[in-house]
Amino acid sequence: MDYQAVLSEVWDAVRPVVGQGRVATYIPALAAVDPRRFGMALATVEGDVYGVGDWREPFSIQSISKVFTLALALARDGDALWRRVGKEPSGNPFNSLVQLEYEQGIPRNPFINAGALVITDRLQRLTGDARGTLRDFLRAESGNPSVDFDPVIAASEADHGHRNRALAHFMASYGNMEGAVPEVLEHYFWQCSLAMSCADLARACGFLARHGQRADGSRLLTRSQAKQVNAVMLTCGTYDAAGEFAYRVGLPGKSGVGGGIIAVIPNRCGLCVWSPGLDARGNSVAGVEALDRFTTLTGLSIF
Ligand code: DON
C-alpha cells in the first residue's frame, strides 16, 4: 500500500475541519497553541515512517502518556495491577469525580485521570522514578533521544491542578495511593508535559502493533498483555466518546488534550495525528476525522 499517498489524500480531505473545535484552555500554556496545525504520521512495524503536514512538530502528549505508563506498570506488575484499577469504560469525562465515590476509590479504567494517577503511583513505587522511566522508554521506542518534558506546561498544569489533586486525595482516603500524593501528582504532571511529534509517537506505539515487542526486539509485554492494553485503548481511550471512536475509526486509540491521538493497527503500524482543536469531549476534531478517513479509505481497521 502507498501509505504516503493515502496520508496525502486524508490530509486533503480533512483540511476543511482543521481549526474547528476549541484548544484546551484549562492548562493556560496549552491555550497558546495555534488550532490550525495538523500533522499525521504512520510508522510500520518494519520501521518505515511516512507523514504529512506538521508531522515532525513536537506537541504536548498529555493523556497519550497514560498508554505508556500503563504498559510499563503492567510489564512489571502483571495482573496484580488490576486490583487497584478497573478496565471498564467510564461513560464520564476524563476528569470526573462522581464515579469514584460510588466505586470506593477504584477508578473505572487506567485512562481516566483517576486511573492514570493510580498507574503513576504504582510505576513510581516499582521504579523509583516514574517520569524518568517513561521518558527513557519513549526516547528508546521513538528513536529520538531529544524527547523531553516541557517544564512550562508541567508548571502550568501544577498551578491549575485542583481536580487532579482532589482525585488523588480522594483515592488516598480509600487507601488506593501508595506514595505521597504530592509526589505522585508531580510525576503525573511531568509525564503529561512530554513533547513529542507525530513521527515520534507513531514509532513509540509500535510495540503495541508488534504484540509487545520493543523496537530493539526485546519484549516489554507478553502477547496477551499487549492485547489487553489495545483492548483498553479501544474501549476507554477516548473517554465518553470511546463508542463513537470505535464506530468511526475501528482501532485502539488514545487521545490527549494537546490534540494528539495515537492509534494501533496490530501487525502493521502505529499512527499518530495531531490537531489542537478539540470537541466537547476533549478529542481532536480533525484528528478523529483523519483517522476515520484513513480506515475508511484503506479498509485497515481491526474489524
Ligand atoms: O490531567 C489532565 O488534566 C491532563 N494533564 C491530561 C488530560 C488529557 O489529556 C485528557 N485527554 N483527553
Image (cartoon, rainbow, N blue to C red):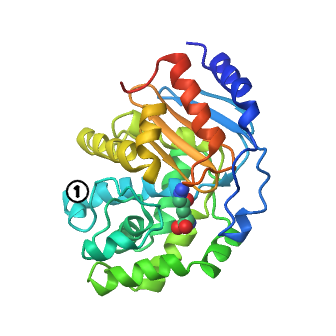
Q: Is residue 87 left or right of residue 136?
A: left
* Disc 1 residue crowd, few under 14, some 14–19, many 20+, Cα 10 Å: few
The foreground one among 148 and 86 is 86
Residue occupying the point 36% across, 39% down: 213
Task: Locate residue 176: give its quadrant.
Answer: bottom left
Q: In which quarter of the image is ligand 1?
A: bottom right
* Mark 1 lies on residue: 78
Q: Where is residue 120 in the image (x, y as percent from the top left)?
A: 41, 68
Question: Is residue 179 at least partly visible in the picture?
Answer: no
The foreground one among 10 and 182 is 10
Q: Where is residue 290 in the image (x, y as percent from the top left)?
A: 61, 32
Q: Quadrant of the C terminus?
A: top left
Q: What element carries label 1?
A: helix
Task: Locate residue 26: give its quadrant.
Answer: bottom right
Q: Where is residue 75 in the image (x, y as percent from the top left)?
A: 30, 54
Residue occupying the point 60% across, 34% down: 289
Q: Position of residue 143 (x, y in %)?
A: 58, 43
**Image: 138 above or below 15:** below
The amino acid beneath tag 1 is Gly
Residue occupying the point 70% across, 27% down: 11
Q: Quadrant of the N terminus?
A: top right
- As drawn, the residue found furthest toward the top would be 1
Total count of labels: 1
Q: In this view, does 194 lie to the left or right of 174?
A: right
Question: Is residue 7 at least partly visible in the picture?
Answer: yes
**Image: 205 above or below 122:** above
